[in-house]
Amino acid sequence: MSQSAEERTAKCADKIVNVFNTGSNQEISELFRYPVGTCFPCPVIETKVEFLTKMDFILDDGLRAIIKNSNPIKDWKPVGWRGSMLNNGIVWIDDYTCLIIGLNYHTKRGIMCSDSIIENDKRKLHPSLREFKSPELKAKTKKFIFRIDNLENNEIRYASWSINKSMDSKPEIILRNGKYVQDGTGGNHKYVFKNKEYTYEVFVSVMSEEEWEVGSLSVLKGEEVIYTDSFDYLDN
């Protein structure tokens, strides 16, 4: 007889809780699906070996205690095809492989890393763009480079340059008051910016059948698409 989603979740959660309570750091590293995201925009952790040297970027005593003291039946719940979560999503797991696939938690070390990268990023930008809270994404198409930033008042800003320019030069386009639009329940989303009769849409693919497909930039004039291309992320 096949297991129910609740039974799969409880079994996986019991394994994870036990390893956190009695296992070594090496055994804990075996519980994650790689790469492991850290506090954005810090680099992801690519391997188990790297995990052991950068564990404090994603795990601290607080998160360890939450996992150790959790009840596999009461505190871990399946959430459809996306997997299962602890509490309100502080930890996400794949309830078929029993691997941790996501953390919504920031350690002190992770925050310090993020703050350092953001401050360095600001210094490299054109002065007109240096005031922001956090970067949402930086990417390039065949013709353009662009970035989306979250400002201090949670306003979303878009800036772009021709592909042969750099971000320390004056942006050719700056658009504010962007909208974040969720696309389904898998994490796919888009950012939408208006510029008179033009609309700029940046679609971000989180769940895709094609591993290479990360997203696209489209420009519309009215209802007509006048430009569209996939993008690649830029390094920090």
Image: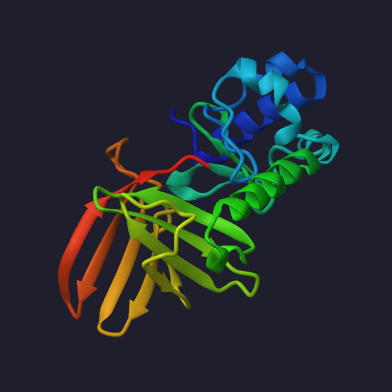
Number of marks drawn: 0
Colour scheme employed for the rendering of this structure: rainbow
- How far from the left and from the top, in percent, is residue 184? 38, 60
95 over 175 or under it: above or below = above
The image quadrant of residue 217 is bottom left
Q: Residue 153: percent from the left, percent from the top?
A: 64, 75
Relative vertical location of residue 176 with respect to residue 226 in this rendering, above or below = below
**Residue 17 location, x and y as percent?**
73, 29
Q: Residue 89 location in percent, x, y?
A: 63, 50
Q: Residue at x 49, y 69 (%)?
A: 157
Residue 227 lies left or right of residue 65; in this view the side is left
Residue at the location (70% across, 45% down)? 116
In the rendered structure, the answer to whether residue 148 lies left or right of residue 50 reads: left
Along the horizontal axis of the image, is 45 left or right of 229?
right
The image quadrant that residue 192 belongs to is bottom left
* Residue at (22, 72) in percent of width and height: 220
